[in-house]
Amino acid sequence: MKLGRVRELMRELDLEIDDIRWYLAAQQAERLLQYRGKLAELSRLIWSGELEKELYDMEERFLEQLQRDQDQGLRDEVGLREILGKAAAARSARYAPEPERDESYPLN
């Protein structure tokens, strides 16, 4: 699938695929922390292979879905900019000096 406008916006925001991967990894980490105290559920997620499927090529699938949503009129450019802007904020936080990092890591 051609990622026309999504790739253009990534270039405009100076985002690399690694930045998208970091953003999604941080979202996954936040999600997995919700399993605290639910060892059986987390174990089942890992054991079943579902987590592996979610993580495999997650950044490419994410970008393809964004482009598909825009192509189908489900997401406009403002929505794309908002999401990719969150990825850019996560990138900035990733490289911020340690004292500036906190629990309110920019994800959602």
Image (spheres, rainbow, N blue to C red):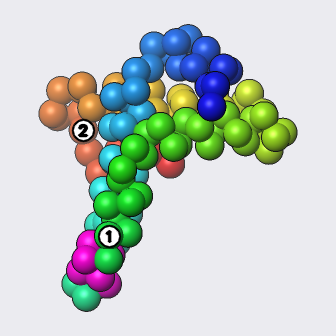
Q: Nearer the viewer, residue 72 or 9?
A: 72
Q: Amino acid at mark 1?
A: Gly
43 lies left or right of 16? left
**Label 1: how many Cα within 10 Å (few below 14, some 14–19, many 20+):** few
37 lies left or right of 69? left
**Label 2: how many Cα within 10 Å (few below 14, some 14–19, many 20+):** few
Quarter holding the N terminus is: top right
* Image mark for residue 37: none
Provide residue 7's location: percent of width, then percent of height. 57, 20
Residue 73 located within the stretch drawn in magenta: no
Give the main secondary structure, helix, strand or loop, of the magenta stretch. Answer: helix
Q: Residue at x 63, y 38 (%)?
A: 66
* Image mark for residue 49: 1
Provide residue 27's location: percent of width, then percent of height. 39, 52
Vertical side of 98 occupied by 5: above or below? above
Q: Nearer the viewer, residue 31 or 74?
A: 74
Provide residue 76's location: percent of width, then percent of height. 78, 33
Q: Residue at x 82, y 40 (%)?
A: 72
Q: Nearer the viewer, mark 1 or mark 2?
A: 1
Residue 19's image quarter?
top left
Furthest residue in direction bottom, as rendered: 40
Residue 45 located within the stretch drawn in magenta: yes
Furthest residue in direction front, as rendered: 1
Residue 22's image quarter?
top left
How many numbered callouts? Answer: 2
**Callout 2: SS:** loop
Q: Residue at x 41, y 58 (%)?
A: 54
Provide residue 85's location: percent of width, then percent of height. 53, 29
- Answer with mark 1 or mark 2, whichever residue precedes in sequence: 1
* Image mark for residue 101: 2
Query: What's the magenta region?
Result: 41-47
Q: Amino acid at mark 2?
A: Arg
